[in-house]
């Protein structure tokens, strides 16, 4: 196989990309993206956002005055 093909396959590799991202984050002193030691990320989940949106929409509906007939 040609060396160009091997280099292209290496660059497309998920393991290679993950390693490059880790090095980039360490060099720039950014927090790691993946969870460590089974710890969960803090912050609201998608369900929390959905629940808050439904509450906001329901609150808007309940405070509207019904149209006069």
Image (cartoon, rainbow, N blue to C red):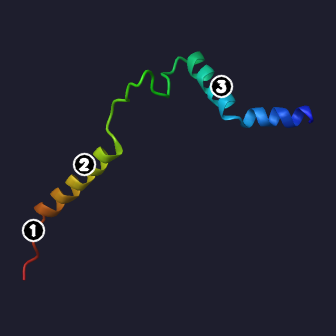
Among numbered discs 2 and 1, the one appearing first in the sequence: 2
Among numbered discs 2 and 3, the one appearing first in the sequence: 3
Q: CA distance from mark 2 to mark 3?
A: 37 Å
Would you say 58 lies left or right of 7 here?
Answer: left
Task: Mark 2 vs mark 3: give the one in front.
Answer: 3
Residue identified by numbered label 3: 20
Residue identified by numbered label 2: 52
Q: CA distance from mark 3 to mark 1?
A: 58 Å
Q: CA distance from mark 2 to mark 1?
A: 22 Å
Badge 1 element: loop
Quadrant location of residue 7? top right
- Depicted 3 relative to depicted 45: above or below: above
Would you say 56 lies left or right of 18 here?
Answer: left
Among numbered discs 3 and 1, the one appearing first in the sequence: 3
Residue 59 screen position, x and y as percent: 16, 56
Residue 49 screen position, x and y as percent: 31, 46
Local packing at callout 3 (Cα closer than 10 Å; few below 14, some 14-19, many 20+) is few
Q: Nearer the viewer, residue 64 or 6?
A: 6
Q: Nearer the viewer, residue 37 or 56?
A: 37
Residue identified by numbered label 1: 65
Badge 2 element: helix
Q: Could you tell me which residue is drawn at 10 percent across and 72 percent down?
A: 66
């Amino acid at each position: 196989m040609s060396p160009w093909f091997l280099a292209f396959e290496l660059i497309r590799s998920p393991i290679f990309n993950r390693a490059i991202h880790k090095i980039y984050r360490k060099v720039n002193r950014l927090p790691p993206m993946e969870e460590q030691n089974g710890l969960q990320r803090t912050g609201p989940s998608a369900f929390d956002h959905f629940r808050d949106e439904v509450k906001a929409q329901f609150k808007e509906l309940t405070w509207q005055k019904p149209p006069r007939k």
